[in-house]
């Protein structure tokens, strides 16, 4: 009777401890998989934002400076060394597209590359 009052459950048995261990063994991989998915999605969002910012910066630099010689170096500085940039345009506007790789995940849930695109319009001052 004193065991019920002190511990609140009666006697501990090996079955109770085994049940807790089994539940932990089932839930731990699920929690770890969810944590890895959240970290992977976070990485994807960060790479996407950096890729878009690199495209925007290159487009602005081309309009302000007037040349595209530094485009690749700006993209590499902002989005990483393996990012690529492509330029297209005419006399009125220039379109900058960047592609930035993401670390591939083992489940195939995340995209392999993120893209950024920016359009800058050229204008002549009066």
Image (cartoon, helix red, strand yellow):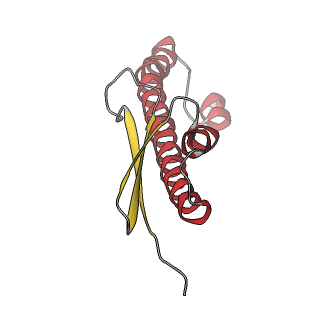
User: What residue occupies the far top of the structure in this picture?
Assistant: 14
Q: Is residue 94 left or right of residue 50?
A: left
User: What residue occupies the far left of the structure in this picture?
Assistant: 108
Q: Position of residue 41 (x, y in %)?
A: 44, 41
User: What residue occupies the far front of the structure in this picture?
Assistant: 126
User: What residue occupies the far bottom of the structure in this picture?
Assistant: 126
Q: Position of residue 114 (x, y in %)?
A: 40, 41
Q: Is residue 42 left or right of residue 97?
A: right
Q: Nearer the viewer, residue 63 or 91?
A: 91
Q: Nearer the viewer, residue 43 or 59?
A: 59
As drawn, 41 above or below 62:
above
As drawn, 121 above or below 1:
below
As drawn, 59 above or below 27:
below
- The answer to which quarter of the image holds residue 90 is bottom left
Q: Nearer the viewer, residue 28 or 69?
A: 69
Identify the residue shown where x is 55% and y is 39%. 72
How many numbered discs, if any? Answer: 0
Q: Position of residue 37 (x, y in %)?
A: 43, 35
Identify the residue shown where x is 56% and y is 22%. 11
Identify the residue shown where x is 43% and y is 17%. 22
Q: Position of residue 86 (x, y in %)?
A: 41, 43
Identify the residue shown where x is 38% and y is 20%. 106
Q: Is residue 100 left or right of residue 126?
A: left
Q: Quadrant of the N terminus?
A: top right
């Amino acid at each position: 009777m004193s065991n019920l009052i002190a511990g609140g459950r009666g006697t501990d048995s090996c079955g109770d401890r085994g049940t807790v261990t089994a539940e932990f063994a089932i839930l731990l991989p699920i929690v770890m998989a969810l944590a890895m998915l959240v970290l992977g999605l976070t990485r994807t969002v960060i790479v996407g934002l950096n890729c878009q910012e690199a495209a925007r910066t290159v487009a602005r630099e081309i309009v302000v400076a007037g040349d595209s010689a530094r485009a690749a170096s700006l993209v590499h500085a902002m989005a990483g060394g393996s990012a690529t940039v492509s330029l297209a345009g005419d006399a009125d506007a220039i379109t900058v597209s960047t592609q930035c790789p993401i670390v591939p995940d083992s489940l195939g849930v995340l995209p392999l590359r993120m893209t950024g695109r920016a359009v800058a319009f050229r204008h002549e001052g009066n």
